[in-house]
Image (cartoon, coloured by chain):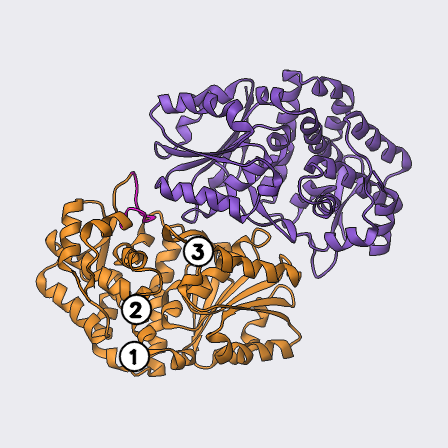
Chain colours: A purple, B orange
Amino acid sequence: METLTVALGSREYPILVGQGILENGGLLLPFLRSPKIAIVTNTTVAPLYLERFSTPLRNAGIDIAEIILPDGEQHKNWQTLNTIFDVLLERRCERSSTLIGLGGGVIGDMAGFAAACYQRGMPFIQVPTTLLSQVDSSVGGKTAINHPLGKNMIGAFYQPKLVLADTDCLNTLPDRELLAGLAEVIKYGLIRDLPFLVWLEANLERLLEREPRALEYAICRSCANKAEVVVADEHERGERALLNLGHTFGHAIETGMGYGKWLHGEAVAAGTMMAAELSRQLGWIDLDDLKRIENLFERAGLPVFGPAMGADRYLELMQHDKKVQDGKLRLVLLKQIGQAVVSDMASPTEIGKAITSRSTDV
Amino acid sequence: METLTVALGSREYPILVGQGILENGGLLLPFLRSPKIAIVTNTTVAPLYLERFSTPLRNAGIDIAEIILPDGEQHKNWQTLNTIFDVLLERRCERSSTLIGLGGGVIGDMAGFAAACYQRGMPFIQVPTTLLSQVDSSVGGKTAINHPLGKNMIGAFYQPKLVLADTDCLNTLPDRELLAGLAEVIKYGLIRDLPFLVWLEANLERLLEREPRALEYAICRSCANKAEVVVADEHERGERALLNLGHTFGHAIETGMGYGKWLHGEAVAAGTMMAAELSRQLGWIDLDDLKRIENLFERAGLPVFGPAMGADRYLELMQHDKKVQDGKLRLVLLKQIGQAVVSDMASPTEIGKAITSRSTDV
């Protein structure tokens, strides 16, 4: 088991990564402020891991409320969030009770936002069960739900007390979701960690084969990268925006195609190719760099073109992005491979050109 | 005009109190991060103050989205909150746009919570137009909406950038609401400021007659008391709970009778009498003290008995209070007049006895 620390002062917390740690309730007990917890999970994860996770806690005398949500991004909304509040109130959970999110990114986002809002804030623990949530969404305190007019538009910055990532959970993950998670892993290499990108190019097959030691290394290195960025800029006023490479384009894909059609990581991969193409147009990276990125995504089975929605539709959807400032689109682009920057230099015409050249009819 | 500062470090902000300052857009401009704002108000306040408030801002080139909600505590819920998000997104408000709450406590609570959640946080300004919101809810960063199972159960601690309290707004306030606001003013005297209580006993009639200088003094002194408490304990881990004298009983009244039947201040006055009676039973204050408090509330036209819902119903509703810890009711009681404490010493039987002796059929 590896332990990382997210050094956020009074809100500092550890990330534990390892094989089989989900079943070790003892790891979690010191982080509870009272013997009452609520576990938020979904209909897919519950039959796989809920009992395994909760039994040792129940045996330790913890009073557990279980909240099993329907699975899927399309449920990341007010209505579902309210079902969490309903149970918390019915079961009389208190401000000192702990809310635990057991599942992927959607569960983590919703459980975290519920914890942020319930009685104006209750302790929260993340137990991510997908690669995407283990390397990205469970670290850094971003929580949110979707709004019909935009993804993650309603949320909070709210840090967990503990993150517990078990590599064994990835054994039950569908291939498509494993690959989508790799998009975010590759992202860390692209934006700030060239040696890690080189490692990924050499070890991608080990990850695709779900080799536990390779997974543990990739998860740890991803979380370490993310933790460094988050500590430097918790509320996304500057550097943290770099984590969104490909995300502004990607959110347009997710929203435009309807939540859930494209997996987040898939949209990020295609969006990253658009950002890379725009970076190439600006003369920052060259065609070889572009091919190098494309090649790695393709080896990981990820899409390297977005859907052909038309550049105008993309641009309209991108205007809703949270990084828009004074109406100007601020995009994360690549100065070179391993170094991202935030830039509002590109005109809508240039952005549209990059979108068109990296989108295609499926 | 008087200026107070809430000294919360990087989240420090000023409270401006004075006559006619609502119409002075110049006071507000330096606090805007972009020339785009959204004003959240309601159907009662809008015809009275919206144009007066927004015209000077519009003349200064500010782009204003107006969001007019239905009036009343019964609308302090998810559905109404969502109408705020709908407009913010339709009008493409950004993370740097400012949300302004123009109205009473319900508007401040909802606008503040919307600002806390929109894109994980946008700047917020409070323009309270009722006495209750000027002396209490606009200061300290508590925001929330109600849940069918409990008042203010879903919310956030979120500080405004500025509070602007115009005493002229109180001229259009119904008598009943002015009196309800006085309950919170009197509270500051009871919990921590005996000299202010003495001033109130001597000057209550000036406040009832809405004399501007007396109002300005009472508002400033109330806000100063609240600001001191909030600075010492922003997230209500200790001292801040003292501000809730009468509130645990009061919330039970509000919830039990149905939101909106009793005004918040009315419920707090009756609840404070229950807390005072319990303090008397514990031997901390005597009957003269109790009569002194009762006398001041009665002169202010406030109820000094709660509705006869039965002690068991009260206790059940009080169990949902956010101050419950490990199932134990922690109540704010009076060690003496001018000094409140948080205590879990009283048994349910003792609490029930105090409730019964201070509740009556209306």
Residue B222 percent coordinates (x, y)? 33, 68
Relative to A155, is A36 above or below? above
Q: Which residue does the image show at 57% across and 55% down from the upper left? A: B118
Q: Which residue does the image show at 86% across and 39% down from the upper left? A: A285
Q: Which residue is mark 2?
A: B185
For the N terminus of chain B, the image quarter is bottom left
Q: Quadrant of residue A66?
A: top left
Mark 3, chain letter?
Answer: B
Q: Is B321 within the magenta?
A: yes
Q: Which residue does the image show at 16% across and 50% down from the upper left? A: B352
Look at discs 1 and 3 and give the one toward the viewer: 3
| Magenta residues (range) | B318-326
Q: CA distance from mark 2 to mark 3?
A: 21 Å
Asked whether disc 2 touches disc 1, contact meaning CB atoms under 8 Å apart, the reply is yes
Residue B115 percent coordinates (x, y)? 54, 58
Q: CA distance from mark 2 to mark 1?
A: 11 Å
Residue closer to the observer: B312 or A330: B312
Give the prevailing secondary structure in the magenta stretch. loop
Q: Which residue is mark 3?
A: B144
Same subunit: marks 1 and 3: yes
Q: Secondary structure at mark 3?
A: strand
Q: Is residue B237 among the parts visible in the rendering?
A: yes
Q: Amino acid at mark 2?
A: Val
Q: Which residue is mark 1?
A: B207
Q: Would you say A217 lies left or right of B279 here?
A: right
Q: Quadrant of residue A96?
A: top left
Q: Would you say A295 lies left or right of A82 here?
A: right
Earlier-in-chain disc, 2 versus 3: 3
Q: Would you say B51 lies left or right of B197 here?
A: right
Q: Residues within 10 Å of mark 1 (few under 14, many from 20)?
A: many
